[in-house]
Structure formats: structure tokens, C-alpha cells
Amino acid sequence: MHKGFEVANSWLGATRLQVASTCLGRAERALGHAISYAAERKQFGQQIGKFQGVSFKLADMAMELKAAELLTREAAWKYDQGTVTEADMSMAKLKATEVLAMIADEAIQIHGGMGLMDELPLERIWRDARVERIWEGTSEIQRHIISRELLRPHGA
Ligand SMILES: Cc1cc2nc3c(=O)[nH]c(=O)nc-3n(C[C@H](O)[C@H](O)[C@H](O)COP(=O)(O)OP(=O)(O)OC[C@H]3O[C@@H](n4cnc5c(N)ncnc54)[C@H](O)[C@@H]3O)c2cc1C
């Protein structure tokens, strides 16, 4: 009796890695659309990807996606080795969910009005991304878990 929280905690880490993984896939898809559109759409006589305002967005999106992927892969590898910590899994979940939110939003921005149209999946990806920072532990709770692991050895 009254052991529900312990039971839930025993698998919450793994489900956080699942959330992180699905976010990476959707972020990759949104980034792919953004890159293609930036290379194809012309304004003021040139491809919009040649404007630094757009190309720097793409660079940041790719870099953040890679960072999220590496955190997730490392946590998953440590999970398989039996050495993963709560903070490892929280970092992967936090980073991947926040990166998906950023990439979905910037991908729409790069598409302009077209980004909101039903012909593309971007608005749907953006809308669906919102819950990822809430379920399986909110972003604030992930930050709490990470900081708790940092402070615990210092008695705080
Ligand atoms: C579509 C959907 C499906 C869901 N499916 C499931 C499911 O299948 N199974 C399941 O168990 N749950 C499910 N949930 C619930 C989900 O896990 C919770 O919504 C989530 O854990 C947040 O809890 P809460 O909504 O009670 O928010 P609260 O805990 O009330 O949080 C409200 C705000 O306070 C902040 N906060 C709370 N505590 C702290 C703290 N200690 N430090 C700093 N900030 C804090 C939160 O970060 C948040 O910003 C689902 C939720 C949604 C939206």
C-alpha cells in the first residue's frame, strides 16, 4: 500500500528518454523542412537562406538539435550500462523538449505565413510540442532534479 510514487519513479526515467527521443525525431523533421524552404524560397532576388537572419537560425537549430541528441544518446547508453542517473535522464528530457519547441517555432518563422498552413506539418509539430515540456515531469521539475543531484553531495 502507498507505494505508487515509488513504482512510478522506477520507470519515469525510461519514459523521459522516450519523450526525448520522439522530440528529436520531430525536431529533425521540422529542421529538414526549414532547410529545404530556405534553399528554395526567393525574396529580394535571392534564396532566403542567404540572408544571415535566416542562415544563423538554421545553424543554431542544427547545433541545438545535435546537443540534445548527444545528451539523449549518452543517457540511453548509460541506461543500458546500468549507470544512468536521474539527472542524466532529466537533462536529456529537458534539452530535447526545449529544443523541439525552439526548432518548431523557428521553422515556422523561416516559412513565414506558409509555416502556418495545413499543407505543411509545422504548425501541428509546434502545437504538439507544447505538452512535452509539461508531461513526464515539467521543465521546472527536471531542473529541480538536476540541481538536486549537484547540491546533494554538498549537503544542500
Ligand atoms: C495531454 C496530457 C496527458 C497526460 N497524460 C498523463 C498520463 O498518461 N499519466 C500521468 O500520470 N500523467 C499524465 N499527465 C499529467 C502530467 O504528467 C502533469 O500535467 C504534469 O506532471 C504536471 O503536473 P500538474 O499538471 O499537476 O502541474 P503542477 O504540478 O500543478 O505544476 C504547475 C506549475 O508549477 C510548477 N511546479 C510544481 N512543482 C514545482 C516545484 N517543486 N518547483 C518548481 N516548480 C514547480 C510546474 O513546473 C508548473 O509550471 C498528462 C498531462 C497532459 C497535459
Image (spheres, grey):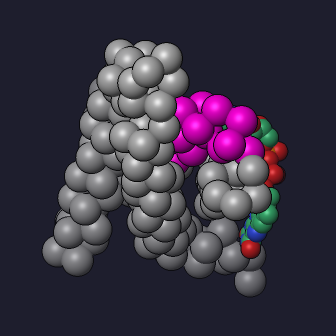
Q: Viewed as shown, does residue 47 lie left or right of 26?
A: left
Q: Viewed as shown, does residue 23 lie left or right of 134?
A: left
Residue shown at the point (33%, 23%) measured from the top left? 50
Tell me the chief SS of the magenta region.
helix
Front residue of 82/140: it is: 140
Residue 89 location, quadrant: bottom left
- Residue 123 visible somewhere in the drawing: yes
Residue shown at the point (53%, 40%) measured from the top left? 107
Residue shown at the point (23%, 52%) measured from the top left? 70
Question: Is residue 43 within the magenta segment?
Answer: no
**Given the current orientation, which residue lies at the most extreme left position?**
81
Residue 98, position in %: x, y? 52, 41
Residue 56 location, quadrant: top left
- Residue 27 visible somewhere in the drawing: no
52 lies above or below 90: above
134 lies above or below 38: below
The residue range painted magenta reads: 99-116
